[in-house]
């Protein structure tokens, strides 16, 4: 998964890219488990829609989208409206369906 900075994310959102943004913190155990599931999801995708961002490096986006906790998965469908946010990483299948729901 490619790591994006706040500036790169803001530009991608503004330009209307379809994205699934995995938000994490480095020392979070639950984030590590979610990351492993998303690694499997990433292998099943045909596009590079799945990216990641350290919550500590995206303070403006955290405030703008009111990200309450990590891990979180922000799903942007190409519009400039707020993303759908998923906090429960239920299963690989569930995550795959959610990420595919925003593919172009």
Image (cartoon, rainbow, N blue to C red):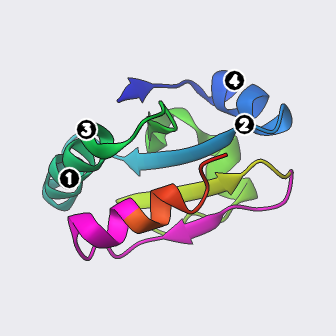
**Crowdedness near tag 1: few (<14), some (14–19) or many (≥20) residues, C-alpha within 10 Å:** few
N-terminal of the pair, mark 4 or mark 2, is 4
Spot occupied by residue 82 in the image (x, y as percentages of width and height): 77, 62
Cα distance in 3D space between marks 2 and 1:
28 Å
Q: Could you tell whether 5 is left or right of 22 in the image?
A: right
**Crowdedness near tag 4: few (<14), some (14–19) or many (≥20) residues, C-alpha within 10 Å:** few
Task: Decide: is 14 above or below 86.
Answer: above
**Crowdedness near tag 2: few (<14), some (14–19) or many (≥20) residues, C-alpha within 10 Å:** some
Q: Secondary structure at mark 1?
A: loop
Task: Indicate the quadrant where residue 44 lies.
Answer: top left
The residue lying at 67 percent from left, 53 percent from top is: 76
Spot occupied by residue 104 in the image (x, y as percentages of width and height): 67, 45
The magenta stretch spans residue 68: no
Cα distance in 3D space between marks 3 and 2:
20 Å
Identify the disc placed on residue 43: 3
Which segment did they paint magenta?
A: 80-96
Task: Decide: is 75 above or below 9.
Answer: below
Q: Could you tell whether 14 is left or right of 50 in the image?
A: right
Which residue is the site of mark 2? 17
Which residue is the site of mark 4? 7
Q: Is residue 73 visible?
A: no
Which residue is the site of mark 1? 28
Callout in the foreground (2, 1) = 2
Farthest front residue?
46
Cα distance in 3D space between marks 4 and 2:
14 Å
N-terminal of the pair, mark 1 or mark 3, is 1
N-terminal of the pair, mark 4 or mark 1, is 4
Q: Is residue 94 visible?
A: yes
Cα distance in 3D space between marks 1 and 3:
23 Å
Callout in the foreground (1, 3) = 3
Quadrant assignment for the N terminus: top left
Spot occupied by residue 67 in the image (x, y as percentages of width and height): 57, 63
């Amino acid at each position: 998964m490619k790591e994006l900075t706040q500036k790169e994310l803001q530009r991608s959102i503004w330009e209307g890219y379809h994205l699934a943004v995995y938000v994490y913190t480095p020392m979070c155990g639950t984030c590590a488990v979610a990351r492993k599931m998303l690694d499997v999801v990433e292998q099943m995708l045909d596009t590079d829609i799945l990216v990641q961002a350290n919550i500590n490096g995206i303070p403006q986006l955290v405030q703008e989208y009111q990200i309450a906790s990590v891990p979180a998965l922000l799903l942007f469908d190409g519009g400039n409206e707020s993303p759908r946010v998923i906090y429960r990483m239920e299963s690989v299948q569930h995550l795959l369906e959610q990420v595919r729901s925003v593919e172009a």
